[in-house]
Image (tube, rainbow, N blue to C red):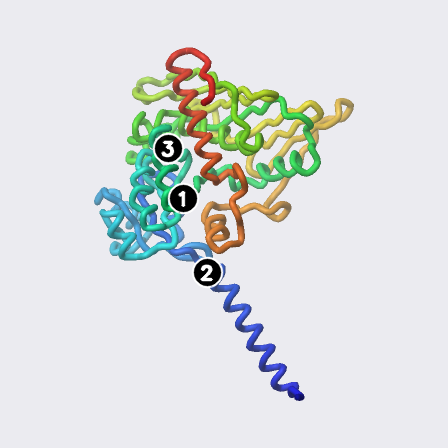
Amino acid sequence: MKISIKKVYLISSFLFFAINVFAQNKMAPVKVVVAGTSHGHAGWILNRLKDSVIEIVGIYEPSKAIAEKNAKKFNLPANLFYSDLKKVLVATKPEAVVAFGSIHEHLNVVQVAAPMHIPIMVEKPLGASLKEALQMDSIVKKYNVPLLTNFETSWYPSTFEAFRLISDSNYVGQIRKVVFHHGHQGPREIGVSDEFFNWLTDPVQNGGGAIADFGCYGANLMTYLMHGEKPISITAVTRNYKPSIYSKVDDDATIIINYAKSQAVLQASWNWTFSRKDMEIYGDSAYIIAVNANKMRLRNKEALPEFEKNVTSKDIHVYTDPFSYLQAYLRGIEKIQPYGLYSLENNMMVVKILEAAKQSAKTGKTVLYK
């Protein structure tokens, strides 16, 4: 049976069209509900109502004043806002819920969304306490629902280039010491909103001050670098240099995490001269310093000077915002790696490290990791 060229063309055209439609649908924007808008990072999503990555179908905000403020600030329709989380999830049937309220509120988001089998992404850290994190872990495992945690450093090309150098070529040799500097001049000093400041400086709503706000970054990155190896012990010291501003929580923390063959030093502070998020990885044969999202400094020979390297998302595969990663994950393009930066197992370990650090700072003693 002969098939005419015209028929072949029509069949080919149809297949090409069908494949493209399938591809477009596969990477269609993720319909999300935003749970809470008091977080200073909420602007990351509220300023993009709909694009190729996400579509906001509803917003849960229990405070009428905050809802009205953000509706005006980001030019959002008033009918997007709900004061009841379950109602907005039932009404809009989202593909995911992203939490931008206080860290303490993450538990409520999981309690409501997980039984409805809705994937969840929260801002760092996972929970305000180990007790809350354990509850969240139990709930999502019961309902087999993904629970991801977003860190800004998960988007950095320099982060993934450092990981690549270590995993692909064992660039630094045996990791001996990793030093993390995370923080800024202070929430009040950099001008965060009142609603953000109020819970960020509350020991229950945030789980601590700088120790929780910025100690979590290094714990997350180190857990990935160590492939989930459990620490032996944690020692921490917290300070309160500005009690007139931060009367309830610490504003500076130094955390030492000891492993069998390595050590991490986390310097988390609301007292840095300038904002910073940098990582120094020292091995027995080289070092890597990720200065910021793109700039790196490296040295691997005693006789040679340090050299600089600039890396962007064009040089290495990295999702430069959390919603692109969420989309790729939900569309089956990406799988969460064991102890990956967004993973639940990594971020449970982060909360355990922070809990031990807070206990160490309170008692003045080194705490064994459990």
Q: Amino acid at mark 2?
A: Ala
Disc 3 residue type (three-letter): Leu
Q: Which residue is mark 3?
A: 134
Residue 144 pos. (x, y %): 40, 46
CB under 8 Å between discs 1 and 2: no
Q: Nearer the viewer, residue 288 or 365?
A: 365
Return the x and y of residue 97 as percentages of the image width and height: 36, 48
Disc on the earlier residue, 2 or 3: 2
Question: On the image, which quarter does residue 37 sit in?
Answer: top left
- Which residue is drawn at the image coordinates 65% and 85% (left, top)? 5
Residue 263 occupies which quadrant of the picture?
A: top right
The residue that label 2 is drawn on is 28
Q: Mark 1–mark 3 contact, CB under 8 Å?
A: no
Helix, strand or loop at label 2? It is loop
Marks 1 and 2, how far apart at CA: 18 Å
Q: Residue 121 — which label?
A: 1
Left or right: residue 186 compared with residue 289: left
